Image: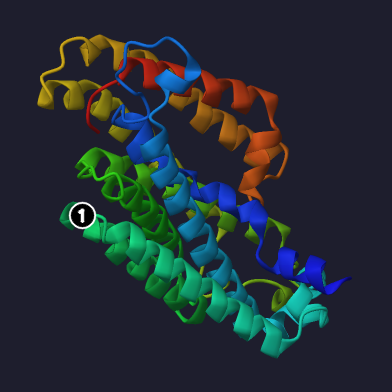
Amino acid sequence: MSLGRAIWRSLRPRQWVKNVLLFGGLAFTGRWHAATSGGGIRELINWADLGVALAAFAVFCLLSSGGYLVNDLHDIEADRSHPKKCLRPIASGALSYQAAVLLALGCFAVALTGAWFLALRAEATLAFGYCALLYLVLTNAYSFLLKNIAIVDVLSIAVLFVVRAVAGCWVMPEPPSPWIIVCTLFGALFIALCKRRGELAASDPENLGETRAVLRKYQTAHGYSEALLDQMIQMAGTAVILSYSLYTFVRPMELNLVSERYGLMFTIPFVVYGVFRYLYLVHKRDIGQDPERIFTDPSMLVSLTLWGVVMLTVTRGRGL
C-alpha cells in the first residue's frame, strides 16, 4: 500500500457522510434559496450561505478524521489482533505511528483554524467555534474512555451527531430549535444501537478478544446482550417516530405558519418507512455494523429523496 493511499484510508472518507447534518441549518431554514426574481439556477441558490455550509462541512470532516486517527492510534494493539481491523493502515504498519500522530495534529489544527474563521464572522456565529471545540473534546473522550462504558458509548455517539446538527445551525447563524436536537438525538441513538447489535451478533463467543471492550462484557452485568439491545432499539425507533411526528404538528404552530400545518405531516410516512426499512436491512442484510450501506439501498434512497424534496418544499423560507 502506497503512503498516499494509507493516509487516505486512515482519514476514513466514507465516514464523512455523517457530517451532512452540517447542512441542516441551511436546508430547513430556507436559507438555501435566494429570494430573487430570476428563474435560473444561479438565481435560485443562495451561493454565499451554501459556501459557508460547505466550509463548515469541511471543518467537521477534518475533525472526524483526526478523531479516527486518534482512535486507531489508541487501539493499535487491539486492532492488530482483529481479523479485519488488522488491515487498517496504522495497525498494519502502512502508516507509521509517528506519521499518524502528525497527521492527526494537522487535521485538528487546520479544522480549528477554519472553525474560528467561520465563528468570528459575527457575534451570532461564535457558537459554531464552541461546537467544533466540543466535538473535538467529545470524540477524543469517546476514543479513550466513553466507548468502553455500556449505554454511555451509544449516548456519546448520539450527542456527537447532535453537536453536528447544532453546529450547522449556528454557522448560518440560526438558533437551533429543541426539535432538531431531540430528533437527531433519537435518530443517532437508534443507528448506534443497531450498530452495537450487529457487532455483537457477528462476534465470536469463543474469541471475545476480537470484539469491542464494551461487547466483551456482554456476559456480565456491565455489558450488552442481544435481547437488551433489541429492547433499546425498539424504544429508540419509537422515539424517533414520535418525536418527528410531534415536530411536524407543533413546530408550524410555534412559528404560526398555517401553510405548513398539514404539509409537514406528509413527510411522516417517509420517516416511518425509513425506520422500518433500516430495521429490515439490519436483520436481513446485516448492515448494522456498516450503516453507510443504507446509501446503496435503492428503496432507502428513494424514501430519503422524496422526504428531502417534500421537506424543502414545505419549509421553504422559514426557521427550524
Q: Residue at x 15, y 16 (%)?
A: 257
Residue 232 seen from this side: no
Q: Quadrant of residue 256?
A: top left
Q: Which of 52 and 66 is in front in this view?
A: 52
Q: Residue at x 49, y 82 (%)?
A: 144
Q: Nearer the viewer, residue 77 or 29?
A: 29
- Does 24 sit left or right of 194 as displayed? left
Q: Quadrant of residue 218?
A: bottom right
For the N terminus, which image quadrant? bottom right
Q: Nearer the viewer, residue 273 or 221?
A: 273
Q: Residue at x 50, y 32 (%)?
A: 275
Residue 294 seen from this side: yes
Rendered image coloring scheme: rainbow
Which amino acid does the dot numbered 1 rest on? Ala
Q: Residue at x 45, y 51 (%)?
A: 55
Name the residue carrying label 1.
122
- In percent of width and height, residue 128 lies at 30, 58
Q: How many marks?
A: 1
* Label 1 element class: loop
- Does 79 sit left or right of 303 as displayed? right
- Does 233 sit left or right of 120 as displayed? right
Q: Is residue 27 above or below residue 187?
A: above
- In percent of width and height, residue 160 lies at 40, 59
